[in-house]
Image (cartoon, coloured by chain):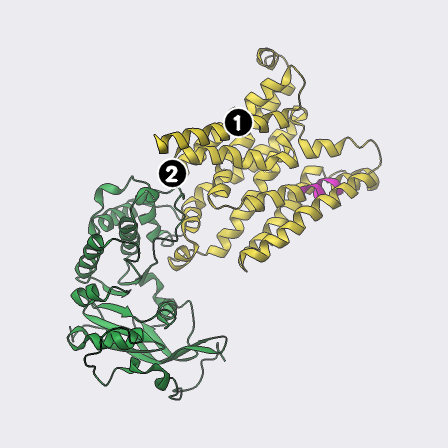
Amino acid sequence: MADNATVIEVDNVCFAYNGQEVLHNVSFEIRERALVAVVGPNGGGKTTLLKLLLGQLTPRYGTIRVFGGAPEAARTRVGYVPQAAPFDPRFPVSVRETVLMGRVGRNRLGIYGREDRAAAGRALERVGLTDFGKRAFAELSGGERQRVLIAQALAGGSELLLLDEPVANVDPEHSGRMYALFKELTAEVTVMMVSHNLSVVTGHATHVLCVNHTAGLHALGEVASSTFTAAFGGYLTAIRHDTSCQVLDPSASMHVPHHGEPVNSHP
Amino acid sequence: MSLFFTDLCHYPFLVNAVAAVALASLAAGMVGSLVVVRRSTYLAGAVSHSLLAGLGLSRLLQRRFGFEGLTPMTGALLVAVGVAVLAARLSLRGRQRADTVLSAVWTGGMALGVSFVAATPGYQDDLMSYLFGSILLVTGPDLMWMAALDIVTLGVMAVCYNRFLAIGFNEELARLRGVHTAFYELVYHVLTALTVVLLVRVTGIVLAIALLTLPAAAAGMLTRRLDRMMTLAAGLCFGVSLLGLAVSYAPGWPPGATIVEIAVLVYLAAACFSKGQRTG
């Protein structure tokens, strides 16, 4: 794994909404084919971090590189998979059409060809939904919808999947299968997922990124339950923690000065 | 009703009326389905009601100042496209403000239209015709004009369908997949405006919104694919329009109102059928 190329480089990134700092001096590196679970309390900056990686937000300080370039330039290689729950349950679209949307921006005319349909078929096969192509997206369960959205990202040729709480509305049995699927996918792609299910995270992820205004990345072997205790604010039993993790006391870390000059677009 | 079909063979104005509803139904089925699934009926309502300003102003300029080239439908088209561009720009800045501004466009457009009609010299027959349609007065040039609008609508829809579907499903995802969503939002709004202008010729300003949305909403209850919904909505739109023309013909009822009443019945029947399927 150590020889794998770097997919994400975050260097001393700070971001604030209306002067209120959400992320402070965040630095980490993720290498290809890792399965990274992003954990932390609500409001800790997990979603903000995903938006920064997608180039939807610009850091106030520091730099972010995805596949060696600016996040905006890497969008075609990054598949964002939102939660399935907010989708309009009555929107009339089939599973195959939904997966094909992963390729909607690839050609100028916006009309799908044989290659697009073949990619959609392969993506459906990867997530185990080959026979679901003609079904309506609205008829599927929460877990099936999430798999369709993952297939959409795969069909678009994504090499990095950013999953926002992928099992939030999935029952325990199916969520276990979903995590097994993410692990399978890391044979080809890098997966970064926001998750609240810590027991399953420790069973499948290769790394854990604890985000609570600051962030610390741990290979799974380094992680003790205290890592999560710190990240979630102390309602878990603390055991032991590597001193390099910054999220133990985010309030202290937040006082560390910014590194470098502010980025121009966010003065 | 049989009198209508007997006379259809003898009177060209009835053939024109049927051709007009066929042309309007094609665009209404496709664009109306998008309007329904994207829940932007309010936009269509604002566009259709604001058309009165364009219709009234062009009639005033024609009669008082002799601008013969500026027909009421040209005025309507210009206003419709203007409102669509405004709404597209507003929709990029948050829905709540867009709704408020569309309300102003809706009511302000109607008020201006009434004032323009009142200032126009001569018999004020136009107002009722604009508000509730005059399908039996459609002429050959009207049909050519409607066919041209139809061709534009169908062509744009054929090219943009996949992108409209992706944006309707989830705009943020579509943008991240490389779709220039702001541009396609503008195209969608202009298409909606063109379709409303087509429908105004059939049912008038007040009732156009019904023909745009009711057949599409009924179709949406019967299928879960947007392409099938569009086809079914176009068929339903033509069916209710033809039935409305036929039913209203002999007793001399207003055809636009009759068409909309039948569309409401079809919508209710589809809702009952859909509910029966779910509970059964």
Whether residue A266 sits left or right of residue B137 in the image: it is: left
Reply yes or no: does residue B54 show up in magenta.
yes
Query: Label 1 to label 2, Cα distance in Å?
Result: 23 Å
Residue behind mark 2: B225
Q: Nearer the viewer, residue B261 or A2?
A: B261
Region rendered in magenta = B51-57
Q: Find residue A90 and report its image quarter.
A: top left
Mark in the foreground, 1 or 2:
1
Q: Check disc 2 and give the amino acid type.
A: Arg
Counting from the top left corner in percent of width and height, residue B247 is at 59, 18
- CB of mark 1 within 8 Å of CB of mark 2? no
CA neighbours of label 1 inside 10 A, class few (<14), some (14 to 19), many (20+): some
Q: Nearer the viewer, residue B256 or B25?
A: B256
> Chain letter for green?
A
Q: Colour of chain B?
A: yellow
Magenta segment main secondary structure: helix
CA neighbours of label 2 inside 10 A, class few (<14), some (14 to 19), many (20+): some
Q: Secondary structure at mark 1?
A: helix
Of mark 1 and mark 2, the one earlier in the sequence is 2
Look at the image and tell me whether residue B22 can be seen.
no
Look at the image and tell me whether residue B160 can be seen.
yes
Residue behind mark 1: B265
Up-down: is B105 above or below A249? above
